[in-house]
Amino acid sequence: MAEKPKRGSHRLPISPIYLALICCLIIVLFIIGGFFEIDRTRRGLRGVLENQGATLLRGLEREIQNTISVIDVMEEVPGGHLLNITSSVNFFALEDVVIDYFLEIARTVDKEEASHALSPGELKSLAREKGLEAIEILNGQASGKDPSPYEALLTGSREIIILPFKGPKPDKDDRFSVAIKRREGEGIVVVSVDYRGMKKLRRTFAIQNVLETAGLGEGVQYVSIFDLSLHVIAQTRREGLGKTRDLSPPQGLQGEGKPRSEFRSLADGQEVLEVIKPLHLGGELYGAMLVGLSTQGIRTILSLSKSNIIISVGVLLALGVAGVTFIYVNQNRHLRKIREMEGRVQTAERLLSLGKLGAGVAHEIRNPLNAIAMAIQRLGSEFRPREEEREGEYHQIVRVIRDEIGRLNQIVEQFVLFSKPYRLNLAPCSPGEILENVSILFAEEARAKSIEIQKEIEPKLPLLMMDKGRITQALINIVTNSINAMEGGGNLTIKAKLDGGHWVKVVVSDTGRGIPEEEIERAFDYSYTTREKGLGLGLPIAHKIIEEHGGRITIESRLGKGTDVSIFLPVKGASGEEDHAPAEG
């Protein structure tokens, strides 16, 4: 046969340590998920900004390409600047911008020459930086130079002279020059550029004009255009013009022309997203385009998203922990019920085994006991000792034998109680009346042992369907145990009240030695007793009687302080009410 599980062998499917680990794992997963969600939101918002910047740069690239195409036509076709070409480019205005640029450089050189003499090398380096052919400082004795074109400047009759190219198709030696009379010293400053340099300057200022006239929209901090050397040739913020930026080399910008982006902090602490893409003119790589977009909008959205994610993670976390706790508590409650049911079944099995044993013992012992009892009775009455002085001792021995036979017969009768189910003679009974009778029954014994019996019985308790004799027997067994537990006297309290409307609760309390906590579960075992001459059958019999009535019995004990035995009897039948399970404890 398969081995039956031992009492108390059931354990929680998941231990509290594992449940705590599961809660921690849930917390970690939710936190990781929150970080991933925030990162995903940040990448999504970055993608939106990047697409916005790429769209803006593509629009600017188309506008720049159109502008450069118009300039190409105006330069290649004689009198092209007079043609009615629909474009935002004003060729004459563009020429004026270039001239103003030359004048600005010339005046700057005039001031610097006044503060310290500029060497030819410095003038050459400055010309190369500004995209010019040459910058010269001349006077009437300029070596190798014919001062006649600038005679009016030298004589002081004019302040500025502009010398254009000699024809629409200048040769490599032709120059466009702007000369001014120096204000800070003697002589003149001449700024000149060849035709190739002039074309480059026209395109640079045309691109700058596109940036200045374009509607860049909200959130655009700046736009920069770089040449192949990554020098800034046009920018919405003019202070960066001509400076070099630390970008990828031009060849790295070719590829498929896809934009790329990166976050950058400005000098004022503001963070921007820079989007950069290659700039192609005439099918060739011309340089790079860069736009700086404010991240204030995505920071605001990201902050709101973080708050929402934190709240969501907190709610889900609370629900997860509550769910795990609910599972643990629910499993614990079910397991406790299983243990109680298992204990009841095992107790019933033990009592049934004891009953079968009692039936056999009663069958084998009852008849010999009756014969012995009858023989002792005859022995005591018919066979007296001849010596009168020994008659008292003789009768005492006979009485002891008769008492012990009676006790042995009582033991056999108690065993017989377990041999078959009780046949209860149910009738409406007053629990208060039964308790009064039991207290009267033990009144004399209690006084003899210095025990005070106190009663707290609610009046008008409902009538219960009970077997009066069996219930009285159960109460006698319980009270007997309580009195035996108070060897040096004490208080015995009998309480009865209506509990929840569906149960009558009877509590028998004593101030005796109590029961150790680890032995309380064994109190209803037929083999358990705390007395040397006790049989351990009182509480098991009471337990069986109460359960046969559909009730429940529990024990609470404090070692050295006393024991409370609680009996719950259902209110049904006699009062027309149905019973419900009593509350735990």
Image (spheres, rainbow, N blue to C red):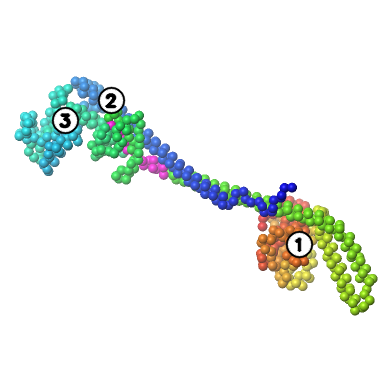
Q: Quadrant of residue 254?
A: top left
Q: Is residue 554 above or below residue 205?
A: below
**Picture layout, residue 429 above or below residue 389:** above
Name the one closer to the observer, 406 or 94. 406
First in sequence: mark 3 or mark 2? 3
Mark pair 3, 2: CA separation = 24 Å
Disc 3 and disc 2 in contact, CB within 8 angstroms: no
Relative depth, front residue between 498 and 291: 291
- Residue 103 within the magenta-colored segment of the rendering: no
Q: Residue at x 75, y 67 (%)?
A: 532
**Sequence order check, earlier mark of 3 and 1:** 3
Residue 282 got which mark?
2
Where is mark 1, residue-wise?
A: 536
Give the side of residue 330 with respect to residue 302, left or right: right
Q: Is residue 137 above or below residue 450?
A: above
- Residue 492 percent across, percent down from the top left: 72, 67
Q: Quadrant of residue 496?
A: bottom right
Q: Are marks 3 and 1 in contact (CB under 8 Å)?
A: no
Q: Measuring 89% from the left and 74% from the top, which residue is drawn there?
A: 394
Q: What x and y, as percent, mark residue 330?
A: 62, 49
x, y (%) of residue 395?
Answer: 89, 73
Q: Residue at x 30, y 30 (%)?
A: 279
**Kind of residue sitting beneath label 3:** Val
Q: Which region of the structure is painted magenta?
A: 287-303
Dot 3 lies on which element?
strand
Q: Which residue is mark 3?
A: 193
Cα–Cα gap, marks 3 and 1: 124 Å
Name the residue type under label 1.
Gly
Q: Dot 3, how many residues are within 10 Å of its Cα: few (below 14), some (14-19), or many (20+)?
A: many
Instruction: Report whether 126 appears left or right of 213.
Output: left
Give the SS element for disc 2.
Answer: loop
> Residue 272: where, in percent of width, then height?
34, 40
